[in-house]
Amino acid sequence: MAFELLVIVVSYLLGSVSFSVLLVRLLKGVDIRQYGSGNAGATNTLRVLGKGPAILVLVLDVLKGIAAIWLGTWAGGWGTWVAVACGIAAIIGHNWPLYFHFRGGKGIATTIGVMATLCFWPALIAGIIAIVSIVITKYVSLGSLLFVALTPVFLIFSGFTPPELWGSIVIAIFAFWRHRSNIVKIIQGRENKIGSKVKEGNRVV
C-alpha cells in the first residue's frame, strides 16, 4: 500500500512540472500566467510564443500523463485504481503545481496523455471529433470539453475496467469545472479563438 501511495505522490510531483511556465520564462523572461488567458498551458503558449514552443509544451504535457499511467500500472497493474489515481494525480499536479505556487493550467494535454494510455481507441475517436470541432469553431476549450465528455461514452461500448470508466467520468467532471469560465464565454461569444495573439504588455482575457 505504501508503494502505491508513493507512486501517486510521484505522479502529482511529475504533473507539477509546468513546461509552459518554464519555457516562456526561459525564452521570453516573463510569467505566462500574466499574459494571454493567464493559463499555463499549450494554447496560451501558442499565443505568447508561437507554434513551435506550443507544440513542445503540448507534447511534454501529454508525456506527463502517459508516464503517470505507466507508473501506476507498474505499481498496481493495468486498468487498476492505482493506475487511474496516478493519472488523476498528474492532472491535479498540472492544474495546481507544487513548484509554482499552485497556479497552473487546466490539464487537458495531460488528460489526453492519461486517457490515450488508459483507453486508446475511445480516446482516439473522441479526439478526432474534438479536433474537427476546433477546426470548425476555433475554440480549443470546446474541443477539450468534447474530448473529456465523449471519451467515457465511447469507453462504455468497448472493453473497460470499472476504474477506467469511473476515472474517465471523474476526469470529465473535473475538466468541466476547470473550464466553467470558458463555458460562459463560449455562450456569450467572448471566448478566445485559436490563433489570437497577445499584445505586448497586455493580458488578454
Image: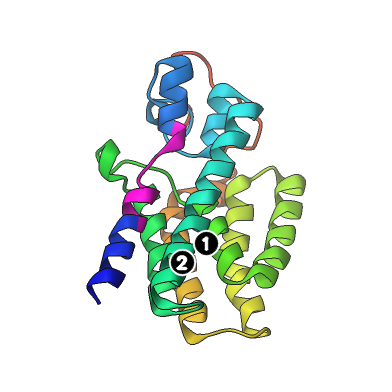
Which of discs 1 and 2 lies nearer the camera? The answer is: 1
Image quarter hosting the N terminus: bottom left
Tell me the residue at 53%/16% (across/down): 199
Determine which residue is flagged by label 1: 114
Tell me the residue at 38%/70% (across/down): 85
* Callout 2 secondary element: helix
Q: Earlier in the sequence, mark 1 or mark 2?
A: 1
Tell me the residue at 72%/52% (across/down): 131
Describe the colour scheme in one phrase.
rainbow
Q: Nearer the viewer, residue 190 or 96?
A: 96
Determine which residue is flagged by label 2: 171
Disc 2 marks a residue whose amino acid type is: Ile
Q: Nearer the viewer, residue 74 or 191?
A: 74
Residue 39 drawn at (x, y percent) = 44, 38
Q: Which residues are magenta?
A: 11-20
Whether residue 183 is visible to the viewer of this picture, yes or no, is no
Marks 1 and 2 sit apart, C-alpha to C-alpha, by: 10 Å
Disc 1 marks a residue whose amino acid type is: Val
Whether residue 63 is visible to the viewer of this picture, yes or no, is yes
Residue 69 drawn at (x, y percent) = 47, 64
- Looking at the image, residue 119 sits to the left or right of residue 37; the answer is right
* Callout 1 secondary element: helix
Whether the magenta-drawn stretch holds residue 94 is answered as no
Q: Residues within 10 Å of mark 2 (few under 14, many from 20)?
A: many
The reply to whether the C-beta atoms of the residues labelled 1 and 2 are less than 8 Å apart is yes
Q: Identify the image quadrant of residue 9.
A: bottom left
Tell me the residue at 33%/63% (across/down): 7
125 relative to 42, above or below: below
Residue 135 drawn at (x, y percent) = 76, 46
Q: Nearer the viewer, residue 74 or 172?
A: 74
Q: Which mark is residue 18?
A: none
Q: Nearer the viewer, residue 117 or 201?
A: 117
